[in-house]
Amino acid sequence: MYHLAKGLYRLATSKEEYSVILLGLDNAGKTTFHEQAKSLFTPERPDPKLRTVPTVGQNVSTLTLPDMYLKIWDVGGQLSLRRLWQSYYASCHAIVFIIDSTDIGDGLLLRNGAGEDGDEDDEDGQVDDRNNENSPETGARNERRSSSSRGHVSSGSQHLGRLDECRLVLEDVLQHSETEGVPLLILANKQDREDCVEVVKIKEGLVKKVFEGEKASSIRDSRVLPVSALTGTGVSEAVDWVRSRVKWNKESRPPVMR
Ligand SMILES: Nc1nc2c(ncn2[C@@H]2O[C@H](COP(=O)(O)OP(=O)(O)OP(=O)(O)O)[C@@H](O)[C@H]2O)c(=O)[nH]1
Ligand SMILES: [Mg+2]
C-alpha cells in the first residue's frame, strides 16, 4: 500500500525532463544566453551574470517550465573544444545553435545569394531595441574575439567575418547521425548591435545553404530567430520554441521523468 501510494505520488508530482545543447562558435553568446534563460526560468531567478569568460568544459542548469524541466548544456565553442560536442548528441532533445550576427560578414552573405532587400519573413521580426551606444561589448571583449577567431578573415578595412567557419561547423553538427531529426533552433544573436547582419540575410545566405546540403531523409523542425542575449530580447521566445518542439518530437526522443 505504501509503495502504491508512493508510486502514485511520484506520478502526480513528476515532470518530463528534456535536454538542450547550446552550440556555436566561441564568442557567439551561448553563456550569455544561458545566463538570461536561467534568470527567467529557474525558481531562484538569479541576476544574470553577463560578464562571461570563455567556457572550458560545460555549464549546466535546469529550467523549470510549467510542463517540463529543460536541462541546458552550455559548452565551449573554441575550436579545440568542439570535438567534445558529439558526446551530447545522443541524449539531447534539441539543439540551439547560436550565431554572432556581427561576425559573419554582411558582404559575403549578400554575395552568397541573399538580396539586399530580402523577403522579410513576418514571423521572424527583427529585434528592435538597438542600443549600440550602450553596448557593453567592450574593447577587451573585441580583443578576445579577434584572438580566438581562427576563421576570422579581414580584407583591408572590410570585415568579412567567420561565415565559412560558422557554416562548416553547423553542417558538421547536422551531418552527425545522432543529431538526425533533432529540432534545431538557430539564434541570430547580438541583434542589439548596430553592425549586426539582419536575420533575413542570415537565413538566405547561410541557413538555407546548410539545409540544401542536408540529407533528403533528414527531416527536422527548425527555426531561425533574432535575439540579443545581452539585453535578453527574444530569450523567452527561444525557450518557448524549444519547449514546444521537444514535446512535438517526444516519440522519437522520449523525455526522462524527474
Ligand atoms: N552586444 C552584444 N554582446 C553580446 C551578446 N551576447 C553575448 N555578447 C558578448 O559576446 C561575448 C561572448 O559571450 P559568451 O556568452 O561568453 O560567448 P560564448 O558563446 O559562451 O563563448 P565560448 O564560451 O567561448 O564558446 C561577451 O563579451 C558577451 O558580453 C549580445 O546579444 N549582444
Ligand atoms: Mg561560453
Image (tube, rainbow, N blue to C red):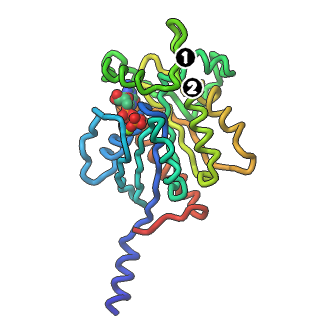
Q: Which mark is residue 23?
A: none
Q: Quadrant holding ligand 1?
A: top left
How many marks do you count on the picture?
A: 2
Give whichever of 254, 103 is nearer the camera: 103
Q: Which mark is residue 163?
A: 2
Give whichever of 253, 68 is nearer the camera: 253
Q: Position of residue 207 (x, y in %)?
A: 62, 33
Please tell me how crowded label 1 is: few (under 14), some (14-19), or many (20+) other residues with Cα within 10 Å.
many
Inspect the image, locate mark 1, and give the three-letter code of the amino acid beneath it.
Answer: Leu
Extreme-top residue of the structure: 156
Q: CA distance from mark 1 to mark 2?
A: 8 Å
Extreme-right residue of the structure: 216
Give whichever of 231, 153 is nearer the camera: 153
* Residue 61 versus residue 12 in the image, above or below: above
Which residue is pictured at 65% across the width and 24% down the height?
119
Mark 2 secondary-structure assignment: helix
Inspect the image, locate mark 2, and give the three-letter code of the amino acid beneath it.
Answer: Leu
Q: Position of residue 124 (x, y in %)?
A: 55, 33
* Residue 190 versus residue 134 in the image, above or below: below
Q: Position of residue 140 (x, y in %)?
A: 31, 21
Q: Position of residue 126 (x, y in %)?
A: 50, 27
Residue behind mark 1: 160
Q: Are marks 1 and 2 in contact (CB under 8 Å)?
A: yes
Residue 233 visible in the displayed image: no
Which residue is pictured at 50% across the width and 53% down the height?
87
Give whichever of 242, 154 is nearer the camera: 154
